[in-house]
Image: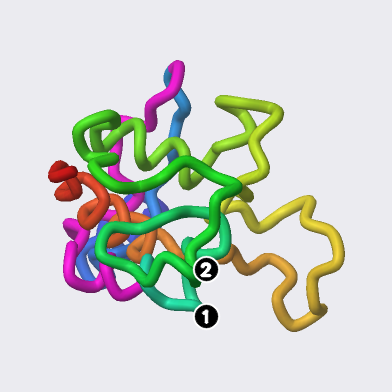
Amino acid sequence: MASRFLLALLLLCPTIAQAWTLEGDRIEQPLTTHAGDATRGEAIVGSRTTGLCMLCHALPGGNERQQGNIGPDLTAVGKRLNEAQLRARMVASREINPASKMPGYFKSEGLINVSPTLHGVPILNAQQIEDVVAYLVTQTAR
């Protein structure tokens, strides 16, 4: 009975978050059953309120004065990392590199100094992670 309910839920809600497993520096399985959208991902990456990527990273085509330099430059990141590696860095950056400053964007537990209204809520949801991955993997030009 429970498995029928879960199957029905997956069919009705195709972007439901999937369980993930870190294998080395990769998360092979997408977090959703719905493919990421590179256009939505580009908007998230470029947003100074949603993804906040520009706080730490230089981005392709962005205003240099408003870009960070704490994290690696994301120009041509699609040449350096594949989809599974990009997903892992967004979800489990500190499991891959304990010295990383990048937060786990899909993490919702064990966070500190979080507003009570945001307890249990990740920075980005599963579909947003997949959208950002879909965008970043297209970044192959220098």
Instruction: Tell me where residue 37 appears, x and y as whole percent.
Output: 18, 64
Mark 2: which amino acid?
Leu
On screen, 17 above or below 83? below
Label total for image: 2
Q: Residues within 10 Å of mark 1 (few under 14, many from 20)?
A: few
Instruction: Tell me where residue 65 appears, x and y as whole percent.
Output: 48, 69
Question: Tag 2's secondary structure?
Answer: loop
Residue position for label 2: 52
Q: Residue furthest right?
A: 113
Q: Residue at x 80, y 78 (%)?
A: 115
Residue position for label 1: 49
Is there a contact, CB below 8 Å, between mark 1 and mark 2? yes
Q: CA distance from mark 1 to mark 2?
A: 6 Å
Of residues 6 and 27, the one nearer the viewer is: 27
Where residue 116 sits, quadrant-wise, is bottom right
- Magenta residues? 24-44
